[in-house]
Image: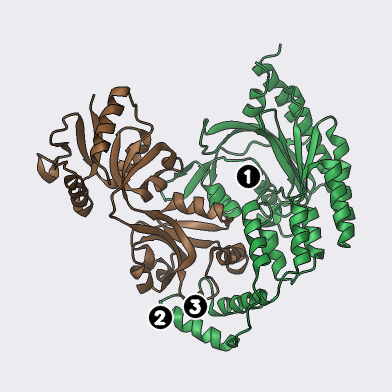
Amino acid sequence: MTITLAVPSKGRLEELTRDWFARRGLTITRPGGARSYLGAIEGLPEVTVRFFPASEIARELIRGNIDLGVTGRDLIHETSEAGPEAVEFARDLEFGHADVVIAVPEAWIDVTHMHDLADVASDFRSRHGRWLRIATKYITITRQHFAKAGIAEYRIVESLGATEAAPASGVADIVVDITSTGSTLAANGLRVLEDGVMLKSEANLIVSRTAEWTEQRRETLNTLLGQLQG
Amino acid sequence: MTNAAYRRSQLESLVEAQGGCRAIPPLLLSADPYFDLAGEEFGRRLLLTTDVTGAEYCLRPDFTLPIVADYIANGAGEPAAFSYLGPIFRQRETGPAEFDQAGIELLAQPDGDIALDQVLTFARAALSLYGITPNVRLGGVGLFEALLAQADMPDAWRPRIRHRFGHTEAMDRLLSRLEQAPDLPRTEQPTRDELVEDVTARMVSAGLSLSDGRSPEEIADRYLEQQALDAAHVPAATLKLLRDFLAIKGDALSALRQIETLAEQHRLFLGPPIKAIRRHLDDLGEARVTFDASFSPRLDYYTGIVFEMRGQGGTVLVSGGQYDRLLERLGATAPIAASGCALWVDRMEAEWPK
C-alpha cells in the first residue's frame, strides 16, 4: 500500500524541503523537472511524492486526500478552524520560521496590548461611524484570536498582498500579518503589540489524521518517519 | 399520533396563535447589516454569496434582524408582535448548515415585564409540545449594570468593565490586571499639546490620514486617560465585590438571596432589578431555574433579563431575553422596548425519547 507525501512545488520551500530530506538520507526525485507534479523517494517505492502549492497541501491534508506533507503551520490554522485537530505536526523542519502578529500604527502610543485594542475597538464605531478595520489574509486565525481576547467590534478587510501598506493607503486601521523579523512592519510605521503574537509558525512535516490509515499504510508511515529523526 | 410531523404541526399552530403577525423575511439578505450589528464573530457563521457587482449577501442567519429592520423601516413606535418558524443558515462545526428556528419578537410593548412573561410562556409552551421540562438559566444584564453604576471606582473604568460582561476570560483578565495594578511612581507627563504634536508627526511620517480613522487628539486623549487610569485604582474592595458577584450562580432563589446579602454589605441599591428577576420565576413553573450572575450574551444591545433553556443533554434549546438597545442600533431614533426568543427546532425534536 502506498502513501502520498506532498512537497511544496516551487521556490525556496521546495529546495529547503528536499535538502532536509536529503540530510536524512532520503533523496526526493522529480523526474519530469519543475513542470511535473509527480515524484518519488529513492529506495522507498511505497511512497508517492506529489508537488503542490503550499496552501493546497494544507487543504488536502485536512481533507485527508493526501497522507502527509510539508507546509506552514500557519496555513493549517488558517485553512479551517478544524485544521489543527485534523492533522498531527510530526516534525519541525526548522526553516520558514515566522509569526502571525497584530500590528498597529506606531503613532498609536496609547495601544500597547490587546486589552488596549479591546477598548479602542469597543467605542470605535460610535466615534468614527464605522468598525475598526483589520487588513489581513489570515481571516480564520484573526477571528479565533480576537474572539478569545473578547474583541468582537471590528471588520476584516481581506488583503492578499502588501498588507503592511493597508493603514497608509486608508484601507484598514491595523493589520494582522506574518513576519519573521518585523522589519517590513517597522518600515511601514507599524508596531507589533506586546502580546500581539497570535501564532508561531514554521515549515512542518504534517500527517493527516483524516486520511484512511490501514495497518499497512500506518506501517509505511512509521518506517518513513523513523528515517526522518530530528 | 406522536410522530415528528405531528409535533411540528403543533408548533406551527402555536407560532400562528401568538396573536401577532407571522413574519416571513426573505431567505437572501444583505450581509452588511449583520456585520454592522454583530461584527466578525457572528460574521464567520454566515453563508455568504456575492452578486455581479460584488455586493455581499447571506442566507438568512436569524429572524430577529430582518423583522426588526423591517419594523423600523415601516415607522417604528406602535406596539407590534411578530412570530416566525422557518429555516435559517449558519456555518457550524458539525451538523447541517440549514436548520429551523421558531420564535417571537415583541416590540414597543407598553410593559417590558409583561412582554418578557409572554416570551417565557411561549417558550415553555413550545418545549412542552416536545415533552421537555427544561433547565432554565437566567442572567441579569440590568442587575449588573445597576451594580456597576453604584460600585465605587473611577468612572472611566465602568465602560471597560461593562464591555467585558459575558466574556468570562476577558473579564477575569481585566480584574486580574486591576488587582495587580502596581503603584508606579508618577513620572512627569507630557502635555496634551506635546502629545498631539508628537502623534501627528508620527502619523504624517507613516503616511496615515489625520482625519479618517483615529485622530492625533483621540490618541493623545486616550493615552492621557490611560495614564490617569493606571493611577486611578479601582479599590480592592470593589474588585472583590465584582469577583464575588460574578461568581454567584445556582438555584435562582438562593442566588438572589446571596446577591441581596452582598448588596447590603456594600450598601448597594439593587432592589428593582432583583425584584424583576424574582417576578419571572413564577412563570417558569416546574422548570429547574438557576441564576448565573456572569451570564450574558456578548452583544451589548441586551438589557434587563436574559435567559437560556436547556434540555437533558445540556444543549441550548431556547435563548432570548430583553434587548431594548437593539432598535436604536438598527437606526431607530428613540429607545424602543424589545424582547423575544429563538427556539432550535431540530434540537427540541432530538430531545423526544426514541
| B84 vs B188: above or below | above
Local SS, label 2: helix
**Residue A164 visible in rendering:** yes
Colour brown, chain: A
Amino acid, disc 1: Pro
Q: Position of residue A160 (x, y in %)?
A: 35, 56
Q: Name which quarter of the figure residue B29 lies in.
A: top right
Return the residue at label 3: B210
Give a yes or no on whether discs 1 and 3 share a subunit.
yes
Precedes in sequence: disc 1 or disc 3: 1
Find residue B122 and report its image quarter: top right
Give the quarter of the figure containing the N terminus of chain B.
top right
The quarter of the picture where the C terminus of chain B appears is: top right
Q: Which residue is mark 2?
A: B205
Chain that bears disc 2: B
Taking depth in this image into account, of A109 and B6 the one nearest to the observer is: A109
Disc 2 crowd, CA 10 A, few/some/many (<14, 14-19, 20+): few
Q: Which chain is green?
A: B
Q: Earlier in the sequence, mark 2 or mark 3?
A: 2
Residue A119 place in picture, x, y as percent: 60, 65
* Label 1: how many Cα within 10 Å (few below 14, some 14–19, many 20+): many
Residue B18 in view here: no
Distance in Å between CA atoms under marks 2 and 3: 11 Å
**Left or right: B238, with A182 as reference point:** right
Q: Residues within 10 Å of mark 3 (few under 14, many from 20)?
A: some
Residue at coordinates 34% horizontally, 69% vertically from top-left? A184
Q: Residue at x 73, y 36 (%)?
A: B21
Q: Is residue B281 above or below residue B177?
A: above
Q: Chain of mark 1?
A: B
